[in-house]
């Protein structure tokens, strides 16, 4: 979770617990600027907006995507979303293939972090 209070340094002798979200997911995305899929993203908040969608099948995925234009996806329990300052993606198999900003990534752990 990321909000204004979370951007302040933590008290001495404490470290925030990382939040873990487990899949399998068909889509995991992150944005830093406002898009239809992440209308609450802001450059100035120090966070990225992360979303994850499980494999819903063709009809379920089409149904969810049709809700994006109206913002209905944000209240749909199949669309998981949160704010974060960093993200680590651990593929479940070394044969998993995914795409990050047009680059094909194969099976390795990927880390993304918001820079100050």
Image (cartoon, helix red, strand yellow):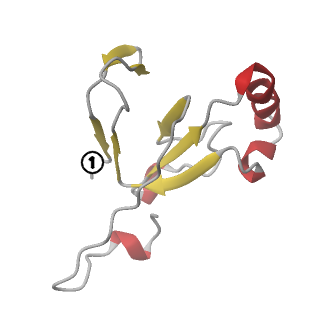
Asked if residue 94 lies left or right of residue 51, the reply is left
Task: Estimate the x, y position of residue 47 in percent, counting from the top left.
Answer: 42, 54
Q: Residue at x 40, y 61 (%)?
A: 19
Which residue is more in the foreground, 35 or 64? Answer: 64
Which residue is more in the foreground, 35 or 83? Answer: 83
Q: Residue at x 41, y 56 (%)?
A: 20
Asked if residue 20 lies left or right of residue 13, the reply is right
Asked if residue 25 lies left or right of residue 105, the reply is right
Q: Residue at x 55, y 30 (%)?
A: 27
| Above or below 22: residue 69 | above
Q: Place residue 96 in its image quadrant.
A: top left
Task: Estimate the x, y position of residue 4 in percent, counting from the top left.
Answer: 44, 71
Q: Which residue is mark 1?
A: 115
Q: From this viewpoint, which residue is outermost toward the left? A: 13
Q: Residue at x 35, y 15 (%)?
A: 103
Q: Identify the element where label 1 is drawn.
A: loop
């Amino acid at each position: 979770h990321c909000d204004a209070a979370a951007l302040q340094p933590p008290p001495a002798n404490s470290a925030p617990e990382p939040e873990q979200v487990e899949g399998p997911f068909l889509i995991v995305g992150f944005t830093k600027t406002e898009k239809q899929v992440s209308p609450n993203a802001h450059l100035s908040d120090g966070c990225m907006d992360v979303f994850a969608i499980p494999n819903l099948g063709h009809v379920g995925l089409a149904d969810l995507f049709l809700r994006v234009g109206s913002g209905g996806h944000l209240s749909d329990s199949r669309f998981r979303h949160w704010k974060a300052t960093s993200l680590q993606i651990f593929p479940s198999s070394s044969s998993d293939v995914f795409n990050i900003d047009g680059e094909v990534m194969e099976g390795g752990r990927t880390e993304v972090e918001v820079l100050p």
